Image: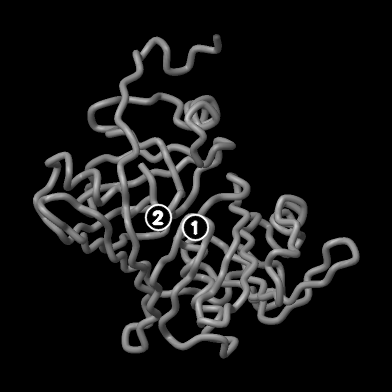
Amino acid sequence: MDGLGNTYIYVDADRFTISDPSAFSVKWSPVYKTDGLILISRSKVADFKMRIFNNDGSEAMMCGNGSRCVGKYVFDNGLTDKTEITLETLAGIKIIKLIVEDGVATGATVDMGEPLLSNKEQVATEDGSLKGQVLKAWSNEYEATYVCMGNPHCVIFVDDINKIDLEKVGPFLEHSNFFPQRANIEFVQKLPDGKLRMRVWERGSGITMACGTGACATAVAASIAGLAGREAVVSMDGGDLHIRWDEKDGHVYMTGPAETSFMCELESAYMLATD
């Protein structure tokens, strides 16, 4: 399934058991050119549960684009008839409001919760925050803002995003000493039309077409910096997301599409075969 080019393999884990999802993701993500694996199952504390494995085998806490696709999957495949779904993730329970057209879910608005601006487990500073902190990458210096959307993000605003060598700078900053758990790295340029143009290096996946949590972090950081209001359109390589940071409840709401690319079946004996 595809959320703005953020593509994962989705498996109904209640029907099909994958004993080693990390190894599965490492093996099959390159085959299908995906960002990783997402397992869907029933939850004891919400309607459904999502587990996310990056293409390097590491388990992620949250995926905004993936959560919309999970909502589409469970609705389109008759696992629920509700258009408002609760989803258990490692970053807490998220609320998904589906956009349904002609009986098919085409997208969703996800309540991504309240952003955190400090976390001593994720940021190695005295107060666990980064706001305008200068990060060095060789001869370059970047002012960074930390935003946690369940997972750590480092947002950097630049004048010309096309001048950033993301493939080189992204992994260098991901492993910065400032981030004990590593971090997702977003470079952002404000465009003349007001959109926030973002490119992302995702922790555990590398360069991706889009990142839902990264778009949320970008909108929050832009609002703090005075580059945007409480609502923004974040434009990524895979398309646009509408992000709203609600002033009343402090939650971030993400709206965007979800698509099914194709369905397939793998024989169980072939799932982790090495040949």
Residue 179 in the image: x percent, y percent? 68, 61
x, y (%) of residue 218? 54, 72
Q: Is residue 136 above or below residue 206?
A: below
Residue 211: mark in rendering: 1
Report the front residue among 213 and 122.
Answer: 213
State if disc 1 and disc 2 touch (CB < 8 Å).
yes
Residue with the mark numbered 2: 65
Q: Of residues 250 and 36, which is closer to you in this image?
A: 36
Q: Is residue 158 above or below residue 83?
A: below
Q: Quadrant of residue 232?
A: bottom left
Residue 7 falls left or right of residue 175: left
User: Of helix, strand and loop, which one carries label 1?
Assistant: loop
Q: Residue drawn at (12%, 47%), measured in percent from left and top?
A: 80
Quadrant position of the C terminus in the picture: top right
* Residue appearing at x 17%, y 44% in the figure: 76
Q: Quadrant of residue 100?
A: bottom left
Taking 187 as reference, is 169 above or below it?
Answer: above
Answer with left or right where residue 232 lies relative to residue 225.
left
Say whether residue 52 is left or right of residue 197: left
Point out the tag, 2 or 1, that comes first from the N-terminus.
Answer: 2
What's the amino acid at mark 2?
Asn
